[in-house]
Image: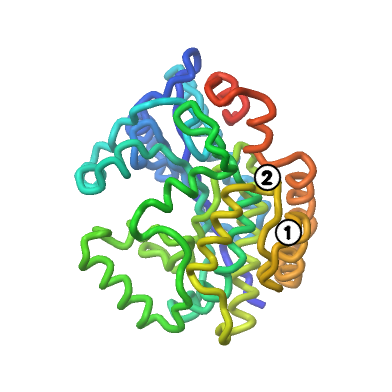
Amino acid sequence: MTTRTVGVEEEFVLADAETSTPVPIGPELVDASHDTALRTEFKQEQLEHATSPCATMDDLAADLTRVRGLAVDLAGARGAVVVATGTWPGAHDPTPGDTDRYRHINEEFGHLAVDQLTCGTHVHVSVESPDEGIVALDGIRAWLPILTALCANSPFWKGEDTGHASYRTVVISRLPTAGPMPVWGDVETYRRTVDEVLETGAAFDDGMLYYDARLSASYPTVEIRVTDVCPDPDVSVAVAALCRALVTTAVDRGPVGPGAPTSTALRASGWRAARHGLEDCLIDPATGRLVRAREAVSSLLGFTREALEATGDFERVRDTTARLLTDGTYAARSRSRGAPGDVAAAVKELRIG
């Protein structure tokens, strides 16, 4: 069984430590850091970091701690805090990123882009070839909504309770290239579809393909993009371990056969995960039936157990998912501890460092 490297990208909102208002200092922090791990994002109130590719989850945890700490220190020196939230909970008009590409996106997509202040965690898992990547994409697609449910951390939007656990998922789904993938079957079909989408102008480049998972345009990886960012780095590490195990399991099983769920069915499954998180039933991909969230998570662990045990990650993932099932997602915790408009309470709950 191949041991694959894993890298994690996390997006955050930068907020004033006193007023809890987002502040557009992302580019300033990146310039000051002199570290390629920190990057600007779609809005100037955001900051992204990227770990190095790691072979073990202990190494990944250490790198996450380092780059998160760097972001916290740089923000703190400017009177700001780093907030891990899938959507900004209050009303705020974000500042467009200061690049030609970001300005073009804002101009082309209008309101869809102008008010978008969302933060996710993206996991890169190495693959040996694009062909292997396609087998992985086809094999993992039905399991991704469970990851969305586990990491749900965006119940509030513009000062209101959205009724969703992961409203970030809903916001992203408005974009024309977002959502679940079809079964690709081969690289040629994937590349042809990408070319057709680019020709429409609905995406300017491969980086604007907001599929739930995709072949990375920059690295020899599969990139999984379905989770809200969470304050607890242990959750990020557990999700990364699950993503690696999903890719390994899918590749070991080989191409999917007939009867794989359609993109329409997966969109509905993903919506249910975004709507309820772990608070209600989810689709179990092993049976195609609605089951209690705990059973769906157990099914995911069963599907990936061999791969998780091979890398020594099973206990870590089992314990972290059990804690989320017992304590609730961050969305559920936010609802229980503060009103939708109490941005200061949300920042206190969700800031890192």
292 left or right of 69 in image: right
Q: How many angstroms separate mark 2 from mark 1 (CA)?
A: 17 Å
Check disc 1 and report the residue beneath it.
Answer: 297
Mark 2 is surrounded, within 10 Å at the Cα level, by few (under 14), some (14 to 19) or many (20 or more) other residues, namely: some
The type of residue carrying mark 1 is Val
Q: Residue furthest top?
A: 18
Horizontal and vertical percent for residue 347? 55, 24
286 left or right of 152 in image: right
Q: Is residue 118 above or below residue 342?
A: below
The type of residue carrying mark 2 is Asp
Frontmost residue, 96 versus 112? 112
Check disc 2 and report the residue beneath it.
Answer: 234
Frontmost residue, 337 versus 64? 337
Callout in the foreground (2, 1): 1
Name the residue: 49% across, 56% down: 225
Q: Secondary structure at mark 1?
A: helix
